[in-house]
Amino acid sequence: MPPSPSRPWGYASAVAAVAVTTAVGLIAYPELALGDIGMMYLPAVMLAALAGRGPALLAASLAVLAFDLCFVPPRFTFVVENPRHGVTFAVMFVAGLAIATLAERLRGEAAIARQADLRARTEELRSSLLSSVSHDLRTPLAVITGAATSAADPAVAAPARAELLESIVGEARRLERMLANLLQLTRVETGIVPTREWVPLDELIGAALTRLEPLLGERAVAVAVGDVEVHVDPVLFELALVNLIENAIKHGAPPIEIGATGADGKVTITVRDHGAGVAPGDRERVFDKFFRASAAPGAGLGLAVVRAIAVAHGGAARVAAPVDGGAAFVIELPAARPPAPGGVA
């Protein structure tokens, strides 16, 4: 592995470390032997080696020059009366070179270890993804195949056929949401910048509720967001709201309450249910990919998508535990002023 390039601050730190060591040595000079002062420069070289081989070699060279100029008789000249001091200079420089080489090797080994760890975690994530997605794709596909096969049977009565078709539509919609989560999560995590525009929050919530009508059934939903506008990617943020509401449907209990407030430079959007809530130990884990807090069907991607979308918009996602029970999932976004008429922001 080629040596990593050294940044300018590394060379500056090398000069500073040698200068500080020289200043300390001058203060302590009457009390210390020359060998002791020479050893004081080794920590300076080690410190410079943390920034790269170049700074370490610079520090070693400056250490030899400073030691000769300030401490070796005759002082404050580069004349060396005793040839033995030349050996001292050589040892100091070789020690600095050895420290620099060792530090560079350790950095290389650390980089290799990080790459190996990243590959291992990537492979683990890929295996988890394939395992989870294959299982969660097989289930609705099996239902769709079985229902379609039964519905095609002429002997099946019309009411039963209608139920089978409804089951097919429901599972197809579930597949659609799962694939949308996978695609959008990949899109967000690869660093694609959201295409933002000013959108009334109640419109996004209305669109999300419309998409979830078959799943909502007769559950009561209370919406109180006022005239809040958010500066978001409408497609992405609607998906985040769909996932939050769907999570409340699957894991909570009605009524579902959706609210929004604006204060302290941020917009806070809350989706609350009145179910059993989230265990304290799971309040961070629920946003991890593939984590499931219950046995309800799903790939464990919905809340991971919510957090990824919130972060992509410069915000955050968290879960709170209301004192009167249930769970409140919160998205916080930076507040900004809508553009004024005429295109002036």
Image: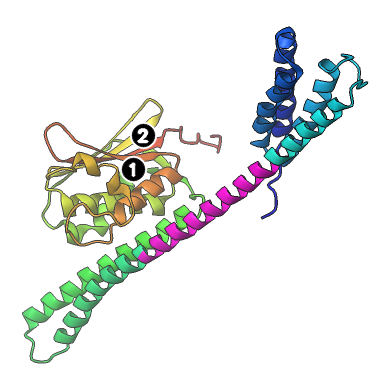
The answer for how far apart the CA atoms under marks 1 and 2 are is 10 Å
Instruction: Please name whichever residue, 72 or 56, is drawn nearer the observer in this view of the structure.
Output: 72
Callout 1–callout 2 Cβ contact below 8 Å: yes
Position of residue 269 in the picture relative to residue 58 (left or right)? left
- Residue 146: image quadrant is bottom left
Mark 1: which amino acid?
Answer: Leu
Question: Which residue is identified by label 2?
Answer: 267
| Of marks 1 and 2, the one in the foreground | 2
- Residue 78: image quadrant is top right
> Is the magenta region chiefly helix, strand or loop?
helix
Q: Position of residue 185 (x, y in %)?
A: 40, 56
| Residue 207 in view | no
Mark 2: which amino acid?
Answer: Val
Question: Which residue is identified by label 1?
Answer: 201
Instruction: Please name whichever residue, 159 or 99, is drawn nearer the observer in this view of the structure.
Output: 99
Q: Residues within 10 Å of mark 2 (few under 14, many from 20)?
A: many
Judge whether 128 appears above or below 51 on screen: below
